[in-house]
Amino acid sequence: EYDYDAFLSYNFDDFPWVKHELMVELEEKREFKLCVPHRDFPAGEILDKIIVDRIHRSRKTIMLLTPEFIRSQWREFEFRMARSQLFDSGNDVIVAVILKPLPPGCLSRSPYQVLKKKLYLEW
């Protein structure tokens, strides 16, 4: 039913960590199939359409939360698209991972308030 086990949503500055740590752990050691924007997005396509398509083709969305992630409009768009799957399917698809300490109160602003009520992983 899904093409990917998870869509990775991360700030592009964190890609070296994603590539050398997370992808090694999840893809190589655990054989998960990840959708990684740096690698799996076709060049020259409309970005928002690709994001929506890949999130809907993924079982889960892993969000690597950092202060830069919270400030990014594209990451907010990805978050909103993943959250819409909760309303569409009833399945909570967001896996939140705090990669770097977050400023106090940053999860209080929309749309991230929902994360205050969620379990999350600290890496």
Image (cartoon, rainbow, N blue to C red):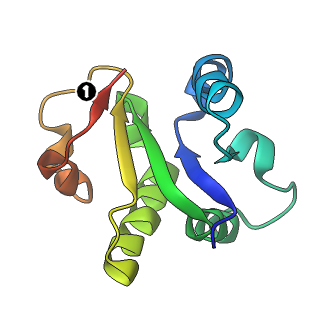
> Where residue 46 appears, x then y in whole percent?
75, 67
| Above or below for 93 versus 119 | below
**Crowding at label 1, few (<14), some or many (≥20) Cα neighbours within 10 Å?**
some
* Residue drawn at x 82%, y 65% as measured from the top left: 45
* Residue drawn at x 44%, y 63% as measured from the top left: 82
Residue 74 or 52: which is nearer the viewer? Answer: 52
* In the displayed structure image, the side of residue 51 where residue 73 appears, left or right: left
Residue 58 or 77: which is nearer the viewer? Answer: 58
Image quadrant holding the C terminus, namely top left
> Where residue 65 appears, x then y in whole percent?
37, 35
> Where residue 21 appears, x then y in whole percent?
59, 18
Q: Secondary structure at mark 1?
A: loop
Quadrant of residue 63 within the rendered picture: top left
Task: Report the label total.
Answer: 1
> In the displayed image of the protein, which residue is found farthest to the bottom?
88
Image quadrant holding the N terminus, namely bottom right
* In the displayed structure image, the side of residue 20 where residue 98 appears, left or right: left
* Residue drawn at x 65%, y 63% as measured from the top left: 54
> In the displayed image of the protein, which residue is found farthest to the front?
30
* Residue drawn at x 32%, y 63% as measured from the top left: 92
Residue 91 or 42: which is nearer the viewer? Answer: 91
Q: Amino acid at mark 1?
A: Leu
> Where residue 77 appears, x then y in whole percent?
47, 60
Q: Say which residue label 1 marks.
A: 102
| Above or below for 57 versus 95 | below
